[in-house]
Amino acid sequence: MTATPVPPLRTPAEYTPDRIAEIRVSSVRVPLPHAISDAKVYTGRQKPLTEVAVLLVEIRSSDGCAGMGFGYSLRSGGPAQYAHACELAPALIDEDAADISRLWEKLVWLNASAGSSGLGIQTIAAFDTALWDLKARRAGLPLAKLIGAHQDSVPCYNTSGGYLNAPIEQVIEAAERSLAAGIGGIKLKVGHPDRRVDLQRVAAVRDRFGPDLPLMVDANQQWDRPRAQRMCQALEEFDLTWIEEPLPAHDVAGHATLANSVRTPIATGEMAGSSADLEKLIDHGAAGVLQPDAPRIGGVTPFLDVLAQARRARLQLAPHFVMELHLPLAATFPGQVWVEHIEWLEPLFEERIRIADGRMHLSAAPGLGLTLSEQARALTSDTRLIARPR
């Protein structure tokens, strides 16, 4: 049999840059079905959460291809992110949309006086994600396949049913609904000022669902070192999958000491504002389960760097929130990985993630596989179009 000849490669001279022609920046406010409270509310440090402020970026290139990215903020920062995005967007007009890493660096340098983490980097994340979505759509590939997937589905757990303000009966009912819907694990919020409340709630869920349920708890940074040590030791009997943020997020040494003194894995990283912050956690052995948040650290580009570091350290991975973005990214990780099920952003999109047998399943659609809904447009409070001069 004669082999089919391989067609010749295109030479660099044939490449035509696909220039960014226009960018739409929108501020969207997504209300929650009801106010929720975690330990930060019970300690008086924050108010109940009632909505998510979403920064939406849509990028269209000269060949008509489009990509969408988004970031978010909780309780404060939404208007500032939107204003900063409008400030940065003109710098991308006429750039080659394929040069994602270079464009990320360009935006970071434009943002330099605002700092290397925080609001500015979170704003850049929406542009970076939109460029990755555009690149995958142009290639006709799901984002996970463009990067290189290790699996087509990822274990998932639910958080939104386990908040502290919900009576334990409601928490158990929500867990039953989640498990019936195919979700594989349950996370409870802890950190109540009365430690007995925490232990009673965890015991009630473990008793109801038995020893085989993957069960996690999250203290939302509300314990000091002595209390964290006592609570982590007291929680050992429940065979938890992990204990999340037992200490303030930037107490790297404290997390490392705790991780080395208890059997249950310690999870942290969601509050990291850059890949460098996460690298510090890795280097100090402060997390058995790393929890990067792509919108908080600058988007897909730095997230992939974090994945490489976590792989080398042989850590488990459990990205924070934004399952619509973290599912395809988590599927590219070769180690143990979980995706957090929080349905708050579902009103923005026409599609729903398929969940079955304890796992979230990747979409076969190109890019992120997401289409903005009419409700997303209705929830938009401000929008601006930045385009080439005509």
Image (spheres, rainbow, N blue to C red):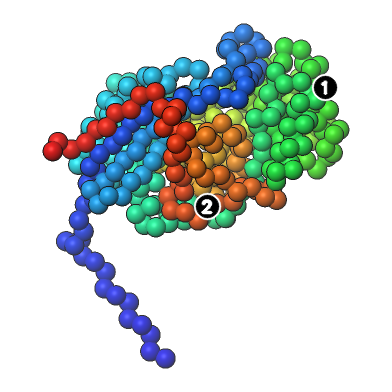
Question: Which residue occupies 82% across, 22% down?
Answer: 200
Q: Quadrant of residue 171?
A: top right
How many circles with numbers are drawn on the protein?
Answer: 2
Question: Residue extending furthest bottom?
Answer: 1
Q: How far across and how far down the image is residue 278, in percent?
A: 50, 32
Is 94 left, or right, of 330 in this rendering? left
Q: Report crowding for label 2: few under 14, some 14 to 19, many 20 or more residues within 10 A (C-alpha).
A: many
Question: Which residue occupies 37% across, 19% down?
Answer: 80
Question: Residue extending furthest left?
Answer: 390
Question: Which residue occupies 69% across, 32% down?
Answer: 187
Question: Which residue occupies 73% across, 32% down?
Answer: 174
Is 90 left, or right, of 83 in this rendering? left
Of the residues under marks 2 and 1, which one precedes in the sequence?
A: 1
Residue 32 visible in this rendered orientation of the protein: yes
Q: How far across and how far down the image is residue 52, in percent?
A: 50, 25
Q: In which quarter of the image is residue 285?
A: top right
Kindly indicate whether the residue at mark 1 contacts the one at mark 2 (C-beta within 8 angstroms): no
Instruction: Please determine whether, in this image, residue 296 is positioned above or below residue 134.
Output: above
Q: Give the amino acid type for the residue marked by disc 1 in the picture.
A: Gln
User: Where is the C terminus found, in terms of image quarters?
Assistant: top left
The disc at residue 5 is: none
Q: How far across and how far down the image is residue 217, in percent?
A: 70, 29
Of discs 2 and 1, which sits in the foreground?
Answer: 2
Q: Give the amino acid type for the residue marked by disc 2 in the picture.
A: Ser
The answer for how far apart the CA atoms under marks 2 and 1 are is 39 Å
Is 333 left, or right, of 1 in this rendering? right
The disc at residue 200 is: 1
Residue 311 visible in this rendered orientation of the protein: no
Q: How far across and how far down the image is residue 326, in percent?
A: 52, 41
Is 331 left, or right, of 27 in this rendering? right
Name the residue beneath numbered marker 2: 363
User: Where is the N terminus found, in terms of image quarters?
Assistant: bottom left
